[in-house]
Amino acid sequence: MTPRALDRGARAELPDVTPAGRLRSRHLLGIDGMDAGEIALILDTAEAMQEIAARPIKKVPALRGRTVVNLFFEPSTRTRTSFEIAEKRLSADSLSIASATSSVTKGETLLDTVRNLEAMAPDMIVMRHASSGAPHLLARTCRSAIVNAGDGTHEHPTQALLDAFTIRQHKGRLAGLKVAIVGDLLHSRVLRSNALLLNIMGAEVWACGPSTLMPAGIDRLGVRATTSVDEAVAGADVVMLLRIQHERMHGHFVPSVREYFTLFGMTPERVRRAKPDVIIMHPGPMNRGVEIDSEVADGPYSVILEQVSNGVAVRMAVLYLLAGPDGQDLRDGGMR
Amino acid sequence: MPQVMDADRMSRALTRIAHEILERNRGLDEIALVGIRTRGVPLARRLAHALKEINGDDVPTGALDITLYRDDLMRHPVGPQPVVRRTEIPFSIDDRKILLVDDVLYTGRTIRAALDALIDFGRPRAIQLIALVDRGHRELPIKADYVGKNLPTSLKQSVRVRLQEIDGADEIVIEEEA
């Protein structure tokens, strides 16, 4: 990271939203239920956290004495590493449990696993689970603050926040941008969280994929759905690609990987239909030659690795903001 | 709400501090100013400007946010997490003399946090402290090297520094708490 001009305030770039003073929920379960002020607060805090990565000693004492458990019931390299680094940079004590090595394989239920962890008094639990709603279940029964690191096909809020952070760094704003999300819409928690967040922040969201991978009621997410990639990409400020999720496909959704690439793969020709200053994003892991051409993935407009770096700053912001001492939930209806 | 310093006197106090800095450090090589957010930052910039007027040298200037180093973080019974803003120190502090700038010196806890934060950026040759106002009531063994004005206060009072860059006017006032 290059040194920036003194006092290049994040606020000056974001004239449209005033950040909230605090998050209303003590958990981060999803983008659903958040407002623009809360999102702006997280993004602004992440802006401050980002500078820590450029220091000789990349560590601040903010979460000293706090214990964070990373509970991952699904394989994850990027997200888990990102949370672990974020926790260490904030001086929290953290440990990671992967389901393959835990007693889950011995037949313990999710609630029993978590109750046992809670008996050791952690302050926060970061959880990824294959079932939609699993972190919400924990939030209703646990004392710890719960951070959703991806639940089934439901939400992946920190991914949407880091995507928004990356877009804001490049475009200076979110409102009024055309964002095209292309790929496996049906199985994507990234789509859901991103569509919700971008809508709250006033962007125009297009979702594009084969009709077999288009969830019913997709318009309720506030997106314009199309099966034409050319229409979705035309004049776009941001093109976000979603992975074809083989592991969640228990049926025949696309005839072949080659056919998918021919019809929906992001090629340099397709990118040329977007705005000249378009940025190309991918939450990872990428399938080169399936949803994205290597030339695009490595092209000058690709911000895919920036997304990964920004993930640490955004997760630091979330952990810091949720680590406040008051355990009350300010939202109507309590836990969400 | 008695005013204890107006724009004119504030400007003279800063000019005097700039002269004291030159006197004490024999030149400005290896010196850098770091302002503590919020109001230490414009004060540091004004001092850099004053030093340039006197000596012609540019002094590197940075901004330090101490929120993540506060000793009361996570200890408030209620209330939101304090807002974190960006620290910007666009130069190496190794082997430099760092002049740390704050508006009001009170308990000394902010300065303790700032010292911890600075050390994470490197190993300065020395750190000197500049405060526009020293109002007393120290809770830690910390003393300023340069003071704009010593202001005896009671614990019931609060000292408010207003600066043109942030508040639209230069003045220092004492407010009695209700």
Image: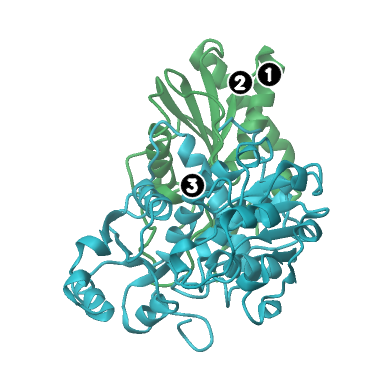
Q: Amino acid at mark 2?
A: Val
Residue wearing tag 2: B59
In the picture, measured across the screen, residue A9 lies left or right of residue B84, that is: right
Residue wearing tag 1: B52
The answer to whether residue A130 is above or below residue A77 is below
Residue beneath the point at 35% across and 51% down = A84
Residue under mark 1: which chain is it in? B
Residue beneath the point at 53% across and 57% down = B83
- Nearer to the camera, A185 or A309: A185
Choose top left, top right, bottom left or bottom right for residue B118. top left
Q: Are marks 2 and 1 in contact (CB under 8 Å)?
A: yes
Please rate how many residues cluster around mark 1, counting C-alpha atoms within 10 Å: few if below 14, some from 14 to 19, many from 20. some
Q: Amino acid at mark 3?
A: Arg
Q: Are marks 2 and 3 in contact (CB under 8 Å)?
A: no
Residue under mark 3: which chain is it in? B
- Are discs 1 and 3 located on one and the same chain? yes
Q: Nearer the viewer, mark 1 or mark 3?
A: 1
In the picture, measured across the screen, residue A5 lies left or right of residue A79, that is: right
Residue wearing tag 3: B135
Q: Position of residue A8 (x, y in %)?
A: 67, 40
- Residue B149 shows up from this direction: no
Q: Position of residue A247 (x, y in %)?
A: 43, 64
- Nearer to the camera, B94 or A243: A243
Q: Quadrant of the N terminus of chain A?
A: top right
